[in-house]
Image (cartoon, grey):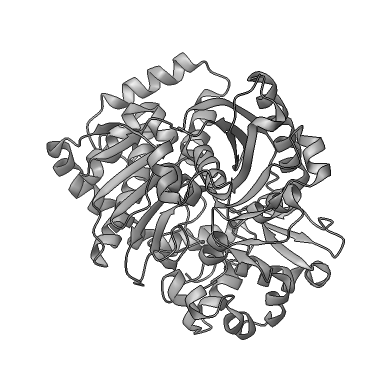
Amino acid sequence: MSHGPLLIGLDGGTEGLRVGIFDTSGTPLVYVRNAYPTNFLRPGWAEQNPDDWWSAAVAGVRQAMHEIHAEPSDIAAIAVGATSCTVVCLDDSGRVIRPAIIWMDVRAEQEAADIAASGSPSLELSGQHHASAEWLTSKSLWLSRHEPETYEKASWIAEYTDYLTWRLSGEKVASLNTAAIRAYYDREKGGWASELYARVGIADLVDKLPDTVVPMGTAVGNLTSSAAEELGLDPSTRVVMGGADAFVAQVGLGVVNPGAMALITGSSHLLLLQTAKRTHGEGTWGSYPDAVIEGQYTVEGGQTSSGSMVGWFRNLVGGQASEEFFRELTSKAEQLPPGSDGLLVLDHFQGNRTPYVDARSRGALLGLSLSHQREHIFRAMIESVCFGSENTMRRFKEQGHNISEVVVSGGAVNNPFWLAMHANVSGVPLQVTKVAESATLGPALLAGVGAEIFSSIQEGVDHMVHVDYQIQPDQEITKAYQPLFDEYRAAYDALAPTLHRLSARQKGESASGA
């Protein structure tokens, strides 16, 4: 049965890989998800096996093709979006030589501090005087110090997206997107940040990164014969460069013009704003040149633990409870007033990305009394995630950025309570697209660009992305949240030294000082 031309998007997430097959109008024909494990060896550490990603992709593509009775010749192209800051070390033969250090792993906080203290001009891409423990550069420096044999043996240090693109095509190519947003790559200033790498003692890192760096939507080749056989696809299928999952999802939301912002919700939250001019400031990341659309810049902010924090609480209080239990918990939380009857949560369970760039911060539950119930804590946690997003949006505005529209995707779209709270806390209308799975639609759209079905990403958006509805904020509730948001900001300022000491204790370090 012929469907073509069809486009495959692979979304490599934190907990599993999702395969989506779309037609060229953006209609999803099938989704298949396969899970893989994460190993949390120590507090702040998180690792995965890259072979699990490939196995999930193979199983998912085969099942998806079977479910829609598609022929291999129906598939025009395939592209990958995956978690960024997820670092894979490969030797000369292409063998993975240690588990991947995934995005939420913040073991490299000392290395990040050393990078931040280097004084390199490249630091303008990470908030001027900050560096993140999550980024590829910090993790590479950690490997050079703590696993020197691994670092020495690694001929290629790759991001998840680049690794899976290589497994598909056999081409060792880096995405301009992941390079720009996580490795200080700046095409306007010569490419890889060799000056920064040298300052912190890993001048040879540039030799472990690909010479070829291409924008999202660029065809890098066709499927290798072995990949085609494993996937059950035709070797003529085009392999197209994708990027970091959230930025690829941004494309799947149609956020490709200056002033548009994507709010990507899920295990973590990301806020991605397109701008026409290059700007840099404290408390945000970027602006990254050409990271999404060539000739534009992208400014980034977000939270490390959002949906993952709420999921942790659900598991803690509910265990294997039915969905009815959680619907009732949500209903009770929804009936509470803004502020959860005097309860406040700080959402830094895995540190803070922006605006504080503080890997040593930790979560906090404040104002607890014997009168509070599970629903109070549940609501306060969701409020804290929304406060965290608003904290970054405020920083965007303080830096002179205009936010003309906000398009949201991810887990919050499936929870009207959470979605409305985001709108109410920010006071900004939110748009929701017809295809909620933007992180899967995005790479499929990029695949269409690389296959020359579309002449540009904008043309792909015009054909494949469609707005479904809009959420309007309740301005009275927005006013009620303002003093609570101020308390949220004040809580971090007051608690940061204590949270840093507690973080040190979790890692078995000395807790003296701040």
**Residue 217 falls left or right of residue 422:** right
In the rendering, at what x and y percent does residue 341 appear?
25, 34
Q: Residue at x 52, y 43 (%)?
A: 453
Q: Is residue 208 visible?
A: yes
**Residue 154 falls left or right of residue 351:** right
In the rendering, at what x and y percent does residue 319 appear?
56, 24
Count how many numbered circles sit on residues in the image.
Answer: 0
Q: Residue at x 70, y 45 (%)?
A: 39
| Residue 414, image quadrant | top left
**Residue 390 falls left or right of residue 220:** left
Q: Is residue 41 visible?
A: no
In the rendering, at what x and y percent does residue 429 appear?
23, 40
Q: Nearer the viewer, residue 93 or 52?
A: 93
Q: Going by the picture, which residue comes out furthest to the left?
A: 476
**Residue 15 falls left or right of residue 147:** left
Q: Nearer the viewer, residue 1 or 422?
A: 1
Q: Going by the picture, which residue comes out furthest to the right?
A: 93
Q: Residue at x 23, y 39 (%)?
A: 424
Q: Residue at x 23, y 53 (%)?
A: 486
**Quarter occupied by the N terminus:** top right
